[in-house]
Amino acid sequence: MRFHMSLRVSFMLSVTSLLIILAALTFFVIEQREKKAIFDEQRTIGLIIAKYIVQLNLNDVLFWDERNIKESIENQIDDEIIYIIFYRPNEESSVATDFINNYDKIYRASLLEGEVNEQSSFFDRKKIKDRESEKFLSILEVEVPIFVKDSPRMWGSIKIGLSQEEVEAEIQDTRMKLSLIVFAGLVIGILGAAWLSRRITEPLKKLVEATVKISRGEFSQEIAIGSRDEIGDLAQSFNEMSRQLFLARRRMEEANTKLIQAEKLASIGRISAGIAHEIRNPLTTVKLNIQKLIQSDRLNEAEKEHISLSQEGISQMEKFIKELLDFTRVSELNLDRFSIEQILEESVKMIADSLALKKIVLEKQFQEGLPQVLVDGDRLRQLFLNILRNAAEALGEEGKIKISLSLLEEQPVNKIKIEIIDSGCGIPEKDRDVIFEPFYTTKSSGIGLGLPNARKIIEQHKGSIRVKECQGKGTSFEILIPCEEVK
C-alpha cells in the first residue's frame, strides 16, 4: 500500500530537519568560538602569571639560588597553579615544585623551540594522573623565556602548569547555556513552522475539500478569504470560478427548463389547437340554429329563457376556445413606446366599476419620472386587467388592492417593476411554482390559461413575472419589464 504524506507533515518534517541542521551548525560554531575565547583568555592569564613569578624571583634566578627559588615557587602553588619549573639556559639544571618531580618526562621537557626572544611564549595541553587522588588533571602548560633589561642573553625560562578545571567547568557551563538557547530556538522555530504550515495548508485543505464538493456538483462552495497573499488570491480565484460554475449550471438548468416547457407547450398547443378547431365548427352551427330558434314566435317565455341559458353556455365555450387559441398561437408583438403608468391606469378604469361594487379600496403608488418602454400596449393592458380581475375575485367585501410602480436600476439595463398586491386569501406556498402551468386552476369556472398567457406575454417582452411571499394574507405579483430611456 502506498504511503500518502500530507503537505503539512511533509512541510513540518522538512522545516524541522532544516532547523535541526542549522541549530547543530550554530551550536558547533558558537561553541568553538567560545572555547577559543576561553582558551585565549586562559593563555593570557598564564602569561601574566608566569611573568609575575619571574619578576618575584628574578634576583634569585640571576644568581641561580635554587633554595630561595624552591621556597618561593612552593609558596606560589594554589588551586590554579599545579606546578612551576625554572630552567637554566640549555637545560643545564632546573628547579621545580615537589608535585612535578614525580613526573620526570614533564619535568625535564622544555617547550622552547627554535629562535627565542622576549616576546616568545609556548603552550601545551596535557592530561596527567594525580598519583594521590587517582584523578586525571587537565593542565595548560605555559613557558616563557627569561630576559633581563638591556641584556641580550636569555637567562633561562619558566614553565607553569595551570589547572583547567575551572576552564572546563566554564566551557561546560557555556555548552549548557548554548544548548538551552539552541533548544529554545529550535522549539520556537518548530512552533513557528507549525503555525506557518497551518496557515499555508489550512486554506489549501479547504480548497481541496471545496474542489471535491464541486466535483460532486455542489457549485455553491465558497472559501473565506483570510489573507491578502498568494493563497488569498488563489481563494478569490476559486470563489470566482465557483460562482461562474454555479451561474453556468443555473443558466443551463433554466435553459433545460425552458426547453422542456417549450416542448410541453408545443405539444399542448398542437393538441389544443386541434381540439379547438374541432369544437369551434359544430359550435358555430349550434349557435346559429339557437339564434334562429330564439327568434321564433312559437316559443313561450320559459322556453326562451332556457334557450338563453344555452346561449350563455355557448358564449362561455367560445371564450374558452379563444383563450385556448390565444395560448397556442405564436403571434408577434406590436411594439411601440408606452408609459407603463398610462397602461395601468387604463386597465384600472376597465375594472373600476367592479371594484366599487365590492367596495374594494385601490391604492396606487407610482414613482414619478419613469421612462417609457418599448412594449405591446394592448397585450400588457389585457395582462394587467386579468391580474386585477383575479385579485378582485379573491377579495371579499371591503378588500384592498395595492399597485406600485418603480424603477429598478440593474445592469445591463434598468427595469420597470410593477407590483400588484391584494389582501385576499393568498396562494399556498406549494402552489406558487405551478400556477403558471397550463390548465392549472382553483376556480370552478376557469380553465387555467390566464396566468400562463400572462407569463408568455411577459417573456415575449424579455421580462419576468413571479408570485412573491406576502406579509400576512394576500397575494403579491411582481412583474419586471426591461426598459431604456427614450432619447
Image (cartoon, rainbow, N blue to C red):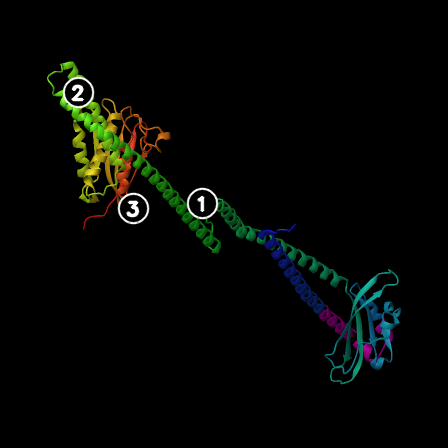
Disc 1 residue crowd, few under 14, some 14–19, many 20+, Cα 10 Å: many
Q: Residues within 10 Å of mark 2 (few under 14, many from 20)?
A: some
Note whether 391 is above or below 458 in the view shown: above
Measuring from the top left, give residue 459's x and y in whole percent: 28, 41
The single residue placed furthest to the left in the displayed view is 297
- Count neighbours of disc 3 (C-alpha within 10 A) and say few if under 14, some if 14 to 19, many if 20 or more: few
Q: Secondary structure at mark 2?
A: helix
Return the x and y of residue 336 as percentages of the image width and height. Answer: 18, 45
Residue beneath disc 1:
219
Q: Position of residue 325 (x, y in %)?
A: 25, 35
Q: Amino acid at mark 1?
A: Phe
Image height check: is 341 above or below 10?
above
Q: Considering the numbered disc 3 on the image, is that residue within a helix, a strand or a loop?
A: loop
Q: In the image, which is nearer the foreground, mark 2 or mark 1?
A: 2
Query: How far is disc 2 from disc 1 in space, using C-alphas?
Result: 62 Å
Q: Give the left or right position of residue 458, taking residue 221 as reference.
A: left
Disc 3 to disc 1: CB gap under 8 Å: no
The residue wearing badge 2 is 308
Residue range of the region highlighted in magenta in the rendering: 42-70
Q: Relative to 369, say whether 438 is above or below.
A: above
CA gap between label 3 and label 1 equals 25 Å
The amino acid pointed to by label 2 is Ser
Residue at image position (56%, 52%) is: 197
Per the image, the residue denoted by label 3 is: 410
Q: Give the structural element (helix, strand or loop) at label 1.
A: loop
Left or right: 134 as drawn, with respect to 458: right
Magenta span: predominant SS is: helix
Q: Nearer the viewer, residue 368 or 298?
A: 298
